[in-house]
């Protein structure tokens, strides 16, 4: 695919479609957040569970708003695009561009699932017994859990990690490296790969607190957490770079669907 710099578009025309998509994913977290807050040992006089859950969801929505704003400001400058962000100003319909990327996006979702499962199998023999026992008690991958993965993972996390973090990293590295003066001012491939890997690794690092709640962090457990969460992110980042954000969204959603299908079929999972 030939990449090109995107024309500057009015900020709010880019902001609202992506923010709306991101908040749909945030809304899908309601059952999980309510369950988590309910399980807490709250002190006497603490706000109601509904209020605490709403505060948590609003905080996530604020992060989404920040990521959408960052992407809208910098992504078009370096040739990265979102079909939703262009929806209100691009006369061309979304579906043809999305349909063209569907085969590679679906394949990316399948490959990322197999890569994560393969890495998980490599790490399993050397994980601590405490973490293995805690993982065995993890909630099952129900239909509801999978829908949450499709909506929050497929839309919200891609807006946060790819549209927000990856775009900002790529733009920042591009500026640090010295922007070329030629008409084609896209970042070099090495800059884009650094941003893709950087965003994926940050996503993995962000999972460490949740893992630490299950078992003490060891070098092996840290490596596993970052590796499993990074490998899929690298694939999604490449799709964002070479196609558009929605290709990464489709791949991420496919990841959750395929993973659930494999878990239901084999009885094992990550």
Image: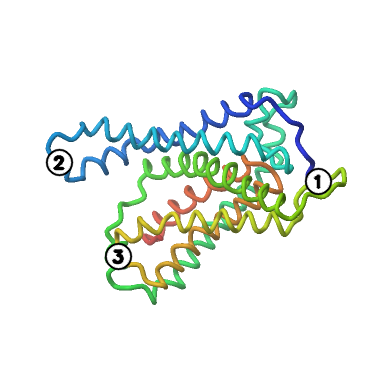
Q: Residue furthest bottom?
A: 126
List the residue tagged with mark 2: 43
Camera-nearest residue between 200 and 180? 180
Dot label at residue 215: 3
* Spot occupied by residue 253 in the image (x, y as percentages of width and height): 52, 44
Q: Residue 77: give x, y in percent of width and height.
A: 73, 39
Label 3, residues with CA under 10 Å away: few <14, some 14-19, many ≥20: some
Measured as percent of width and height from the top left, residue 160 is found at 52, 43
Q: Earlier in the sequence, mark 3 or mark 2?
A: 2
Which residue does the numbered mark 1 point to in the structure image? 185
244 lies left or right of 214: right
- Does dot 3 land on a helix, a strand or a loop? loop
For the residue pair 154 and 210, the one nearer the viewer reads as: 210
Query: Measured along the vertical axis of the image, is residue 7 above or below residue 167?
Result: above
Image point 50% across, 64% down: which residue?
A: 227
Q: Nearer the viewer, residue 171 or 41?
A: 171
Depicted 87 relative to depicted 82: above or below:
above
């Amino acid at each position: 695919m030939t990449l090109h710099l995107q024309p500057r578009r009015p900020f709010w025309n880019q902001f609202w479609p992506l923010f709306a998509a991101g908040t749909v994913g945030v809304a899908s977290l309601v059952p999980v957040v309510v369950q988590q807050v309910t399980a807490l040992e709250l002190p006497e006089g603490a706000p109601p569970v509904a209020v605490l859950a709403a505060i948590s969801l609003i905080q996530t929505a604020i992060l989404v708003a920040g990521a959408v704003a960052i992407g809208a400001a910098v992504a078009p400058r370096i040739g990265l695009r979102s079909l939703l962000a262009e929806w209100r100003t691009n006369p061309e319909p979304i579906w043809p561009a999305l349909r063209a990327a569907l085969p590679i996006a679906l394949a990316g979702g399948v490959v990322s699932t197999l890569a994560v499962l393969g890495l998980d199998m490599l790490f399993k023999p050397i994980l601590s017994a405490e973490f293995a026992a805690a993982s065995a008690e993890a909630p099952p991958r129900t239909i509801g859990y999978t829908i949450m993965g499709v909506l929050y993972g497929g839309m919200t996390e891609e807006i946060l990690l790819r549209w927000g973090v990856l775009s900002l990293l790529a733009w920042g590295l591009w500026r640090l490296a010295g922007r070329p003066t030629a008409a084609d001012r896209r970042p070099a491939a090495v800059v884009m790969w650094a941003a893709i890997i950087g965003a994926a690794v940050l996503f993995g690092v962000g999972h460490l607190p949740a893992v630490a709640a299950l078992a003490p962090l060891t070098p092996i457990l840290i490596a596993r957490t970052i590796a499993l969460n990074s490998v899929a992110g690298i694939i999604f980042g490449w799709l964002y770079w070479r196609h558009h954000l929605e290709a990464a969204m489709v791949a991420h959603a496919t990841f959750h669907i395929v993973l659930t299908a494999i878990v239901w079929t084999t009885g094992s999972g990550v």
